[in-house]
Image (tube, rainbow, N blue to C red):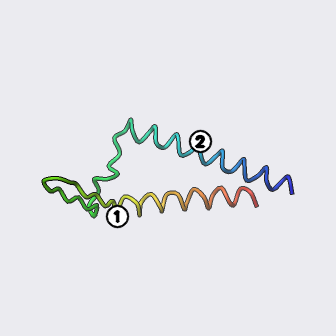
Amino acid sequence: MIQSVGKVFLLVGVLLVILGLVMILAGRMSMPFGKLPGDIVIKRDNFVLFVPLVSMLVLSLVLTVILNVISRFFR
């Protein structure tokens, strides 16, 4: 029981480190997230509506691949 909890903590820690590194690198490389074709931006006088559809699809795909690789590591 305690080993499985330890594996979960280790997995969460690794994921947080990877997410932090991706965020740092994305900030330095000026990634186009939020500016991809298919992202919706509506600007009016008093508000801006931003719906990052394609950016979230790309992010979901990348996270799915990363999680599948990590889950195979723990089997």
Give me the residue at 84% from left, 53% from top.
Answer: 3
Q: Which of the two labelled residues, at mark 2 and mark 1, occupies the earlier sequence position? A: 2
Give me the residue at 22% from left, 54% from top.
Answer: 48
The crowd level at tag 2 (other Cα within 10 Å; few <14, some 14-19, many 20+) is few
Numbered label attached to residue 4? none
Q: Quadrant of the N terminus?
A: bottom right
- Image x and y of residue 27, in percent: 39, 38
Whether residues under marks 2 and 1 lie with C-beta atoms below 8 angstroms apart, the answer is no
- Image x and y of residue 18, in percent: 57, 44
Give me the residue at 23% from left, 58% from top.
Answer: 41
When the figure is inspected, residue 1 is found, relative to residue 20, above or below; the finding is below
Give me the residue at 28% from left, 57% from top.
Answer: 50
Is residue 17 found left or right of 55 in the rendered image?
Answer: right
Which residue lies most toward the top here?
A: 28
- Image x and y of residue 63, in percent: 52, 57
The crowd level at tag 1 (other Cα within 10 Å; few <14, some 14-19, many 20+) is some
Q: Residue 70 occupies which quadrant of the picture?
A: bottom right
Is residue 24 found left or right of 17 in the rendered image?
Answer: left
The kind of residue tagged 1 is Leu
The kind of residue tagged 2 is Val
Q: Quadrant of the C terminus?
A: bottom right
User: For the image shown, how many numbered marks are present on the structure?
Assistant: 2
- Image x and y of residue 49, in percent: 25, 58
Is residue 14 found left or right of 51 in the rendered image?
Answer: right
SS at mark 2 in the image: helix
Q: CA distance from mark 2 to mark 1?
A: 25 Å
SS at mark 1 in the image: helix
Q: Which residue is mark 2?
A: 17
Q: Which residue is mark 1?
A: 53
Which residue lies most toward the front here?
A: 46
